[in-house]
Image (tube, grey):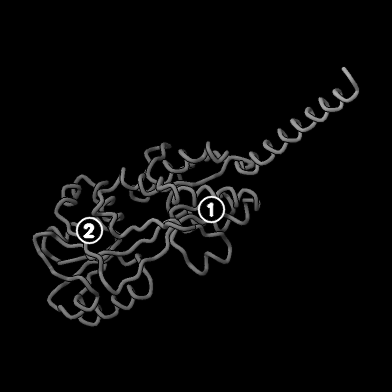
Amino acid sequence: MSAKNRAVESALVLLKLLTGFTLVASGAAATADCSRPISVPAAPTGFSVITSGDKVSGVYPDVLRELGPKAGCSFNFPVVPRARLDHMFFKTGEADVLIPASRSTERDKTALFVPLIQVSPALISLKTRQLGITSVKQLVENRALRGALVRSFSYGDEYQALLLELDKDKRIDYVTDLNIVARMLAAGRVDFTIVAPTLMFSSLGENAMTVDLNDKLQYTSLEGLKRIDSGAYLSRTSLDPADQDALRKLFTDAVKNNLLWNTFLKYYPTDVLRGVVTRTTP
């Protein structure tokens, strides 16, 4: 082989090596693997997170298990009491991800929020009642209607303003959970409640005494109540910046490719999801 041919062959080998290195490097960057298993403590949250002993399922665990291998991330779902979730995430740094979570200014100070859906509370009543209410204004003006609400729930400033108006006429009974609300609706003691449809549907489905009530309820969006952000918080304490970026991409991909929305549809009827809007842009 001539010196010229050997030089050409050496150049081709070098080009292949450089090209292969570039492809590997770009592939690694695109994968954005997590550096370690990610801890996502799980507490029962309707059908969003379902626990049975140590087994965890539901909308968000299903999405993470589906996308995890593609993103180079694996997840652990330790089952904990609901009261411990915020403490583990915001206080002790034992949790990497808090999901589902509503957004607040206070939480934004210490963790990175990734918006996934927007939730709008709905007016919920028995179909047979045919209330004909479609706005906050109509509800306030129809003083004959009485409601039951869970005191700890909150859906933004407009919701709180509505409660103040209804409280002026003593038209609200405050209770501790949605199963009590459901029984009051079924017994005709109240005419309506206001809550996220997904939460009402899943709460009824978990209780044998109220599961049959789901088919009898009507969900109506109220003009005058804004949607609120719901999504995932990523810990700035336990996660390094690279892992935060990898997880943020994983969650936004779940929205872009409709995986999150399609997983919601596996657990909820379409009419219940009218108040849940998946984001089309990150």
Marks 1/2: CA distance? Answer: 30 Å
Which of the pair 101/250 is nearer the observer? 250
The image quadrant that residue 1 belongs to is top right
Q: Is residue 135 left or right of residue 145?
A: right
Residue 12 spot, x, y in % from top left: 78, 29
The image quadrant that residue 135 belongs to is bottom left
| Residue 32 badge | none
Q: Name the residue: 51% across, 46% down.
A: 40
Which of the pair 279/23 is nearer the observer? 23
Q: What amino acid is labelled 1 in the image? A: Met
Q: Name the residue: 20% across, 75% down.
A: 139
Q: Is residue 175 left or right of residue 64?
A: left
Residue 30, relative to residue 16: is it above or below?
below
Evaluate if marks 1 and 2 touch, with contact meaning CB atoms under 8 Å apart.
no
Residue 75 spot, x, y in % from top left: 52, 40
Secondary structure at badge 1 equals helix
Secondary structure at badge 2 equals helix
Residue 53, relative to residue 117: is it above or below?
above
Which of the pair 84/270 is nearer the observer? 270
| Residue 88 badge | 1
| Residue 180 badge | 2
Neighbourhood count class around disc 2 (C-alpha, 10 Å): few under 14, some 14–19, many 20 upward: some
Residue 259, relative to residue 230: is it above or below?
above
Residue 137 spot, x, y in % from top left: 22, 79
Q: Which residue extends farthest left? A: 128
